[in-house]
Image (cartoon, grey):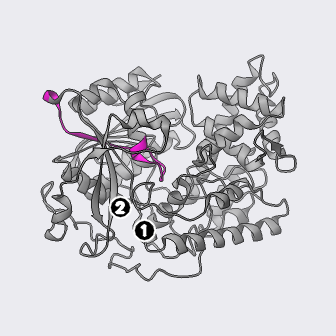
Amino acid sequence: MKRISRLGLIGRASACLLAVATIAGCTAASDLSDAADSGSGRPGAPSPDSGRSGTPGDPTPALARFYTQKPTWKGCETDDEDQRKQAGAFRCAMFNVPLDYAHPEGKTIDIAVTRKSAGKPGQRRGSLLLNPGGPGGSGVESAWWMAEDSIGASLQESYDIVGFDPRGVERSAPVRCLTDRERDAYVAEDLPDDPAQAEARSKAREKQYAAECNAKSGDLLPFVGTENAARDMDVVRAALGDDKLNYLGFSYGTYLGAVYAELFPKSTGRLVLDGAVDPAADGLSSAVEQRVGFEKSLRRFAEDCASRADCPLGRDPATAPTKAADFLDGLQDNPLRAADGRKLTSGLGWIGVISLLYGDKDTAWKYLRDGLTLAMVKKAPDALLFYADNYNGRDEEGRYDNSADAFVAIGCADGSGDAPSPEQVQAALARLKSDAPLMSRDTTADDLTGEDCENWPFRSAAKPHAISAPGSAPILVVGTTGDPATPYASAQKLASQLSDATLLTFEGEGHTAYGGNSSCIDGAVEAFLLTGKRPAAGTRCT
């Protein structure tokens, strides 16, 4: 049994529930006392016009104090020694926002924001807000390393580089569910081979997980969705002194940017959405497409590996993909013990491999070959375990960030849509068996039924829908043909939905394109952000 997650950035490729795609059906026994329905059918969601009027930066009176706040900036603090140099180039502040925008006079939370001032103040053109994806990724930490490694010098000369942790993430009222020890056990566990036992264990885990989330973060859960995060971005925009939002979002960050454009079209400046998500896709379809995408990447990696003398998968490109899957599935019965005593289970092995399939062919695939060689030939799983830990947000001391908990909470707050029909389930299963057979060997129809978050502590009425954002400024959408996590078709669909968007294509491997994969992509993105000039329709970069 391989129950597929319809919330995850990646489908469940093994019997283990992937840590970032934490649970397939979120369950809990109790309701939240503070999850008041504002009348929109979505807890905490105000009407579409709440918080803004016809002109940018002109909020309704109830929200004026948030839009006009003057946060106190100070040096950024971090416990991670590796981040201190990067953080030293930034200043940090907390921005106050309503917990529930439908009731701004009520409870508030603080949003962590970091800023690096433009290198050439004389040509400064405002702030460039970043989001790294997830949902659950820390925009504060991402801004620190992106400014050092991937954001072009011309952008840093002309823009203040700004990152923020969305509500529910890390420094911004973080959602907490499992302890570090509980998370260790959760991500390492492989479900039983017996389908009935696996189903029972899976449901028990889901109930326990959701109950822990409700106990530790119940008051926050209804209000961490993307719509509220987009409203927070508008508060940050105004409080920073910008009339328009200039934005660079990756992966899930493309959905956040699209939702912002839908809510605040007249406040959009120059938006770049890289590694685009299709907002109209239902959860099951998205998860199936992701699993197909990762299987394609696994096969391309294995075939490339087979062309090299040091490949642990053999020299036959036709059988190399199967050897990789056989090894990873075999870890369920024969896990490998690392130097620190921990075991590389099948679930952790798949996570380690998939984490590197996010990367590019020239660098990440080499690390993956080396990691598989160590595990398959030398029975040393430490490298694959390291990559799984990195993906799961686990540091060397065994401490986890809250990205996995935030991922599930934000997904459930965004609404999972209706349970799929029997016809949809059969179509999805047929697609998996045809196009992702290695990652769906044990997947059954029962694994695809049911509704995500059906017993989560509150019900969200949000539904997947196309976003057109009429009246927005021109938007640049970037898609990568070999992107496994957000397949290229999603970028095509988002670009076609938006009223005024241009699609820029990167012909290559890996998840997202801007930031070093291609000088052609980097040049086009930076030209758009600096001058507003869009690449010609149909532009493709290699």
Name the amino acid, label 2: Glu
Callout 1 environment at 10 Å: few (<14), some (14 to 19), or many (20+)?
some
| Cβ–Cβ under 8 Å for marks 2 and 1 | yes
Distance, label 2 to label 1, CA atoms, is: 10 Å
Residue at image position (75%, 60%) is 444
Q: In this view, does 500 lie to the left or right of 148?
A: left
Q: Which of marks 2 and 1 is in front?
A: 2
Which residue position is annotated with label 2?
227
Task: Tell me, yes or no, if residue 300 can be seen here.
Answer: yes
Image spot of residue 24 (x, y percent):
62, 63
Name the amino acid, label 1: Ala
Which residue is more in the foreground, 27 or 6?
27
Q: Is residue 82 left or right of residue 436?
A: left
- Quarter occupied by residue 145: top left
Image spot of residue 160 (x, y percent):
25, 37
Which residue position is annotated with label 1?
462
Q: Give the range drawn in magenta.
A: 122-141
Toward the top, the furthest residue is 309
Q: Is residue 177 left or right of residue 440?
A: left
Q: Is residue 123 magenta?
A: yes
In the picture shown, does residue 65 fall above or below 487? below
Count of all numbered marks drawn on residues in the image: 2
Q: Is residue 301 magenta?
A: no
Which residue is more in the foreground, 371 or 47?
371
Q: Which of marks 2 and 1 is nearer the N terminus?
A: 2
In the picture shown, does residue 54 fall above or below 161? below
Which residue is more in the foreground, 504 or 184?
184
Callout 2 environment at 10 Å: few (<14), some (14 to 19), or many (20+)?
many
Residue 430 is marked as: none
